[in-house]
Image (cartoon, grey):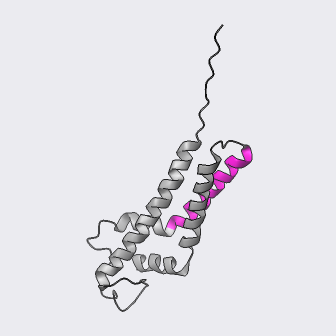
């Protein structure tokens, strides 16, 4: 009789990939918003609602990144919080095998959460919505 050892796969890898992909997507969107402000003003700065550099400019007009960024930046605290909740529930239930990559994902989500709640990023989100 031959016994074949099988390795059970967990669904944790898709979660780890999604967490890291979202953190990278958030960083790209934040960079694109700052690049748009620099393009409109002529120099790099932190934009806010009604600033003197882009007060009369159409911020979202003709900009391909407008819709994805308008969805990503304001909802980042909710998505990062939900991701941390899901990872916490999986850790409590003991469903996580890949601890190191998952801890790196937790660190990335905490960084996204902290950055998205800073006054500078809140001002950028308000500037885009304005």
Q: How many marks?
A: 0
Please name the residue shown 66% across and 44% down the image: 96
x, y percentage for residue 117?
57, 74
- Quadrant of the image containing the N terminus: top right
Q: Is residue 58 visible?
A: no
Extreme residue in the left direction: 62
Query: Measured along the vertical axis of the image, is residue 129 above or below residue 97?
Result: below
> In this view of the protein, which residue sits in the foreground, 49 or 104?
104
Tell whether position 38 is magenta. no
Highlighted range, magenta: 75-93
Query: Measured along the vertical axis of the image, is residue 42 above or below residue 94?
Result: below
Please name the residue shown 55% across and 66% down the image: 112
Q: Is residue 85 left or right of residue 22?
A: right
Extreme residue in the top direction: 1
Query: Measured along the vertical axis of the image, is residue 78 above or below residue 43?
Result: above
Q: Is residue 19 visible?
A: yes
- Quadrant of the image containing the C terminus: bottom left
Please name the residue shown 49% across and 57% down the image: 22
Please name the residue shown 55% across and 49% down the image: 16
């Amino acid at each position: 009789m031959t016994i074949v050892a099988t390795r059970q796969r967990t669904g944790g890898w898709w979660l780890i990939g999604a967490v890291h992909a979202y953190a990278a997507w958030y960083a790209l969107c934040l960079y694109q918003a700052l690049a748009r402000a620099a393009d409109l003003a002529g120099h790099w700065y932190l934009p806010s609602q009604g600033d003197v550099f882009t007060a009369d400019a159409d911020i979202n007009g003709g900009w391909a990144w407008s819709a994805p960024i308008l969805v990503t930046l304001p909802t980042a605290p909710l998505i990062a919080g939900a991701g941390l909740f899901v990872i916490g529930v999986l850790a409590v239930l003991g469903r996580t095998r890949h601890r190191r990559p998952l801890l790196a994902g937790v660190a990335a989500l905490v960084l996204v959460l902290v950055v998205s709640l800073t006054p500078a990023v809140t001002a950028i989100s308000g500037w885009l919505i304005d």
